[in-house]
Image (cartoon, rainbow, N blue to C red):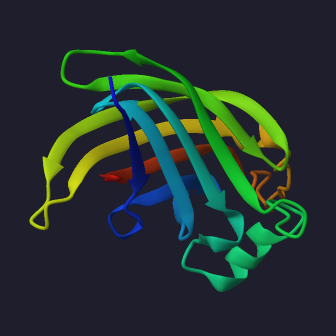
Amino acid sequence: MAKTTWVADADHSELGFKIRHLMITNINGKFDNFTVEAETEEEDFMNAKVTATVDIDSVNTGNAQRDGHLRSPDFFDVDKYRNIVFKATKAESVDNDGSYTLYGDLTIRDVTKPIKLDVEFGGVVKDPWGNTKAGFTVHGKINRKDFGLNWNAVTEAGGVMVSDEVKIHCEVQMLKRS
């Protein structure tokens, strides 16, 4: 079988996250600069070698002050740690419609932990310009403290500013390289 290389189409992909703020609402964010690469056998993604690299400095929550705090040593510490990296280790089929669980190693602040992600495979199509694309919706969650993202503050009422759980949500369109 022939090896096929795929790369994320950044114009049609988004790597996002959601976290509880003041424990009453969610704040959404995303990373504007990232790469996702996959190597498959033909167009079969079940045994794909997948690596995602995220430029932490590109964090974007729509609020410059908050983004600056996320870049600081309280959180990502971009002066010391430039990237978040995910490397897939295995995939397990969940059902016959293309849903599966993707296992891999996530590295943030030089701390690597195994995580699992729920993946919905949207299929493979040719776009109007003849490019072959594959689509994926990815969900998961991590505990930020597992990766050394420990900052928090107690509110006047005794609650906390930021939850420990971070929900991951990604929409990824992969482009088949010729």
Counting from the top left corner in percent of width and height, residue 55 is at 66, 64
Q: Which residue is at 70% across, 64% downward?
A: 56
Residue 96 found in image quarter = top left
- Is 127 placed left or right of 18 in the picture? left
Task: Decide which of 43, 158 is in the foreground and name it.
Answer: 43
Quadrant location, the N terminus: top left
Q: Which residue is at 32% across, 43% downward?
A: 136
Task: Decide which of 2, 96 is in the foreground and name it.
Answer: 2
Counting from the top left corner in percent of width and height, residue 50 is at 51, 37
Counting from the top left corner in percent of width and height, residue 163 is at 68, 48
- Is 163 placed left or right of 172 in the picture? right
Q: Which residue is at 67% across, 47% downward?
A: 85
Counting from the top left corner in percent of width and height, residue 162 is at 71, 55
Count of labels in the image: 0
Where 49 sits versus 15, above or below? above
- Farthest left residue in view: 128
- Is 154 placed left or right of 171 in the picture? right
- Farthest bottom residue in view: 64
- Is 151 placed left or right of 177 in the picture? right
Residue 105 found in image quarter = top right
